[in-house]
Each structure stands twice: as structure tokens, then as C-alpha cells.
Amino acid sequence: MKASGIAVAGIVLLLLAGLVVWIAHTLRPHPVRIVDDARHSTRLGRAAPCDAQTGEGFVVSGKWHIDEYGPVLEVTPTPCGRRVSEDLTKRDSLDMEVIEKFSGNLNWRNTRGMINQLDCHLINFPQKPTWNLEPDRPYVGYADTWAAECNPSVGRPDTPFE
């Protein structure tokens, strides 16, 4: 009887310790990244709106689903978001908006590969109704993502300064 009481107390202590760690992690301030490079949005790590006059963003919606290959983020861009391929600042803001809105999902991973897929869709297929970003596709660099029509399937190591 005494041993089972000690076991229960130990389990309770472990649960309390886990709760304390979770609360501390949840309440900790998240760093804000300020980017000084002129090619990036400088709004304290937040994506600038696509249209400054109307405040329209770059993305209408994004939905996660699972297909036969794994998770897919189906992004529906705004009309403004479809037209920013030539403006590097706005393209970076599109990337930041997608990361801000959807990277909190457990399916999000391979950020560089997903952003390469996003930029590839923006430049090569802006009129597609939705752009599918697949975190399980390998990161291969933008040139190889473009060559694979936004769907790279064979990973390779990074080359220097790509």
C-alpha cells in the first residue's frame, strides 16, 4: 500500500512538472525578427499588406489536407497576391504571410522547400486557383524546384551559396 502511494505521488509530481514546463513555454515571449534588408518587409517581422490602400493581404485562405503522398497546404491567393512576382519586397511579404498564418500547424516543416514551392507557383502558375505546398517534398533549391514545375521529388545536398 505504501509503495502504491509513493508511485501515485511520483506520477502527480511528474504531471505537475510537465504542466509547469508547458505553461513556461507557452507564456515565454516569442522573439520578433526585424529585418533591415531592403528586399524584406521591415514591419517588425510582420508581413506588409499586398495593397497598402485597401489593406488586402496576399492569401485568402489555406487548408491542410492529407493526400496519398502526405500533408498538403492548399493556398488560395488574393488577386493582389497573384500579381507580386516582380516585386521582391512584396514576394517576401507573401512568404512571411504564409509562414505567419500556417506554420503553427503540426504538418508544417521544411520551410525553405515550402517557400520555394510557393515562389515557384507565384512566378510560373499565378492563375491556378490554388497553390499546393507539400512539406514532404525535398528541399532542392529554387532552381531545381522551378525545373520540376514546383514539385521536386529527389533531394540533393545544398551547393555552396545557392
Image (tube, grey):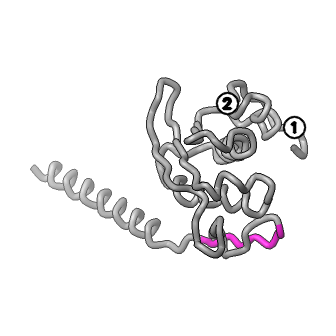
Q: Identify the residue shown where x is 46% and y is 45%.
A: 63
Which quadrant is home to the C terminus? top right
Give the Cα separation between the discs numbered 1 and 2.
19 Å
**Label 2 amino acid?**
Asn
> Is residue 17 left or right of 10 when viewed as pictured?
right
Image coordinates for residue 122, horizontal then vertical, percent: 70, 46
Q: Where, by quadrant of the figure, is residue 16 drawn?
A: bottom left
Q: Which residue bears the numbered disc 2?
A: 151
Q: Residues within 10 Å of mark 1 (few under 14, many from 20)?
A: few
Magenta region, mostly helix, strand or loop?
loop
Report the span colored magenta.
Answer: 31-38
Residue 38 found in image quarter: bottom right
Left or right of residue 39: residue 22 = left
Q: Which is nearer the eye, 145 or 20?
A: 145
**What amino acid is found at the position of numbered circle 1 in the picture?**
Thr
Q: Which mark is residue 159?
A: 1
State left or right for residue 118 relative to residue 162.
left
Q: Is residue 32 magenta?
A: yes
